């Protein structure tokens, strides 16, 4: 099986009898770790070791344990035991699951009753249901030291921001009750953008017939949502007849048209490429139910997915 390229000049040292876990880069095996024991160091190359696996065999009858000569970069000691406090796994957690005689990197995709979890395995591209006892948090062995478990770091970050997020949510709810607005509630507040407000400003943006825009409304349940639309024609002083691009009339025979005040209309925002992703507490527009809704990143999940709080 192929090996990974070392990323530094540091080289791990193992002795005969040391317990290890072995990783592979072969297709179908990436992200897996198999337990074994170091037999000896290779005579011609001191950075390679002969390892005997615990549960992999040379033959299909399981009579002789498999031995392989492996590069040091493929080996690590067994991870330290979990803390005595029981780990509470949840949807979106990155985990390692015991499957086919090894530990495989994956992510929890569903929570089932009875302490079971559906896990998508990155290497084999399978989704399998595991009992909690067959899961552990992922670890990293870097230059002879165990780095903090990924999920522990993530949970610590969540704890650090949870107080701020709860304050933000409570503030928003309080503002809804009192009818007041904060001067600044998130990172991306922009005074140049048209805002949905109960009183339109004296000077508003002018729009021409046929231009593509986004519109918002003050109706209950739709505040903070921006819908794609087209300007049909002016319908009054600082007011336009628009046609929605995703909303239809009651019998779904044609797209809905409405008169909208100019202060509740904005040009379509430019396309912005996000390179590094979003951070917790970032204010974002999230596409949901045929509209872009203003929200706040509440949690970062796997594969560039996010939990967004809508006020």
Image (cartoon, rainbow, N blue to C red):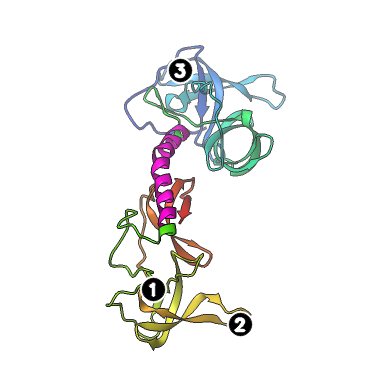
221 left or right of 233? right
Q: Please identify the quadrant where the C terminus is shown.
A: bottom left
The rendered magenta stretch, by its main secondary structure, is classed as helix
Q: Is residue 236 visible?
A: yes
Q: Earlier in the sequence, mark 3 or mark 1?
A: 3
Q: CA distance from mark 3 to mark 1?
A: 73 Å
How far across and down, in percent of the image, does residue 51 sit? 53, 20
Query: Which quadrant holds residue 259?
Result: bottom left
Query: Which quadrant holds residue 261?
Result: bottom left
Residue under the point 45% across and 34% down: 150
Disc 2: CA contacts within 10 A as few (<14), some (14-19) or many (>=20): few
194 left or right of 110? left
Q: CA distance from mark 2 to mark 1?
A: 26 Å
Residue 170 included in the magenta stretch of the image: yes
- Secondary-structure class at tag 3: loop
Q: Which residues are magenta?
A: 151-175
Disc number placed over residue 264 in the picture, else none: 1
Residue under the point 48% across and 70% down: 219
How far across and down, in percent of the image, does residue 292 sit? 45, 64
Q: Nearer the viewer, residue 295 or 303?
A: 295
Disc number placed over residue 235 in the picture, else none: none
| 195 in relation to 262, above or below | above
| 59 in relation to 223, above or below | above
> Of tags 2 and 1, which is closer to the observer?
1
Residue 229 included in the magenta stretch of the image: no
> Of tags 2 and 3, which is closer to the observer?
2
The residue that mark 2 highlights is 253
Residue lying at the far front in this picture: please name it.
Answer: 178
The residue that mark 3 highlights is 42
């Amino acid at each position: 099986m192929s090996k990974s390229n070392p990323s530094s000049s540091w080289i791990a040292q193992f002795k005969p009898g040391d317990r290890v876990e072995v990783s592979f880069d072969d297709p179908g095996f990436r992200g897996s770790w198999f337990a074994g024991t170091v037999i000896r160091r290779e005579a011609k190359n001191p950075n390679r070791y002969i390892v005997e696996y615990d549960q992999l065999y040379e033959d299909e009858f399981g009579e002789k344990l498999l031995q392989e000569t492996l590069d040091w970069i493929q080996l690590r000691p067994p991870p330290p035991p979990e803390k005595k406090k029981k780990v509470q796994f949840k949807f979106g957690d990155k985990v390692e699951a015991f499957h086919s005689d090894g530990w495989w990197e994956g992510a929890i995709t569903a929570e089932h009753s009875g302490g079971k979890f559906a896990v998508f395995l990155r290497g084999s591209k399978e989704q399998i249901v595991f009992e909690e006892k067959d899961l552990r948090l992922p670890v990293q062995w870097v230059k002879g030291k165990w780095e903090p478990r990924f999920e522990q770091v993530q949970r610590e970050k969540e704890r650090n921001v949870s107080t701020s997020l709860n304050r933000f949510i409570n503030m928003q709810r309080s503002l809804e009750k009192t009818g007041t607005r904060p001067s600044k509630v998130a990172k991306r507040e922009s005074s140049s953008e048209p805002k949905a407000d109960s009183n339109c400003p004296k000077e508003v943006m002018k729009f021409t017939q046929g231009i593509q825009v986004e519109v918002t409304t003050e109706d209950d349940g739709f505040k903070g949502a921006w819908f794609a639309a087209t300007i049909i024609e002016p319908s009054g002083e600082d007011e336009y007849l628009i046609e929605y691009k995703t909303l239809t009339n009651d019998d779904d025979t044609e797209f809905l048209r409405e008169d909208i005040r100019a202060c509740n209309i904005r040009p379509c925002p430019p396309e912005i490429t996000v390179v590094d992703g979003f951070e917790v507490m970032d204010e974002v527009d999230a596409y949901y139910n045929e509209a872009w809704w203003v929200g706040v990143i509440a949690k970062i999940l796997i594969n560039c997915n996010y939990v967004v709080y809508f006020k």
